[in-house]
Image (tube, rainbow, N blue to C red):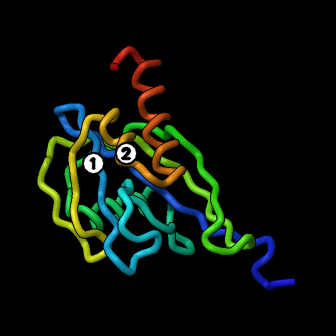
Amino acid sequence: MSEDVGRFTFCVAAIIENENNEILLLKRAPGNFPENIWDVVGGRVEQFEDPFEGLNREIIEETGIKDFEIYKAIDVFHWYQSESFRDMIGITFWCKTKSNDVLLSDEHSEYRWLKPEKALVISEHHIVTSNIKQFIIEKKRLGLY
């Protein structure tokens, strides 16, 4: 039995919405697992790091966007990264920004601001698809869609 059984990594993700009601998708660069897929902003929370600090760090590192608001949690996700004992558990937050300017990190090769329905069309990863669907559901629930 592996020493990793019973351990998991905690992640945070962000659906970032601009003033045009578009959301930001980032394309994973070759060599970054899972590569060449459209993704939302996110990553692992470091040990002893507050989840909100981790979310802030990931948004700034991956997009260069510093002026944003964390609006609310909208989804919880779980998946296995390549092996059945490598659990990834996370929370996706709806964030808002007035900025459309993105400065990509080396983790990503391109970005797009898209209406949520169009983002669903290019989404290939089940977690990203779930995040976008939950975003749409929450906007409808609040009468904002």
Asked whether 52 or 81 is in front, the reply is 81
Q: Residue at x 36, y 67 (%)?
A: 36
Extreme residue in the right direction: 1
x, y (%) of residue 110?
Answer: 22, 63
x, y (%) of residue 61?
Answer: 29, 69
Quarter-of-image position of residue 72 = top left
Residue that mark 1 sits on: 24
Label 2 crowding class (10 Å Cα cut-off): few <14, some 14-19, many 20+?
many
Is disc 1 in contact with disc 2, using a CB cutoff of under 8 Å? yes
Amino acid carrying mark 1 in the image: Leu
Q: Residue at x 33, y 42 (%)?
A: 119
Query: Quick one: quadrant of the N terminus?
Result: bottom right
Asked whether 111 or 18 is in front, the reply is 111
x, y (%) of residue 6?
Answer: 79, 71
x, y (%) of residue 128?
Answer: 46, 49
Asked whether 96 or 49 is in front, the reply is 96
Q: Residue at x 25, y 47 (%)?
A: 68
Q: Secondary structure at mark 1?
A: strand
Amino acid carrying mark 2 in the image: Ile
**Location of residue 3 with respect to 132 vertically, above or below:** below
Q: Secondary structure at mark 2?
A: strand
> What's the mark number on residue 76?
none
Query: Quick one: quadrant of the C terminus?
Result: top left
Q: How many marks?
A: 2
> What's the mark number on residue 15?
2
- The CA distance from mark 1 to mark 2 is 7 Å
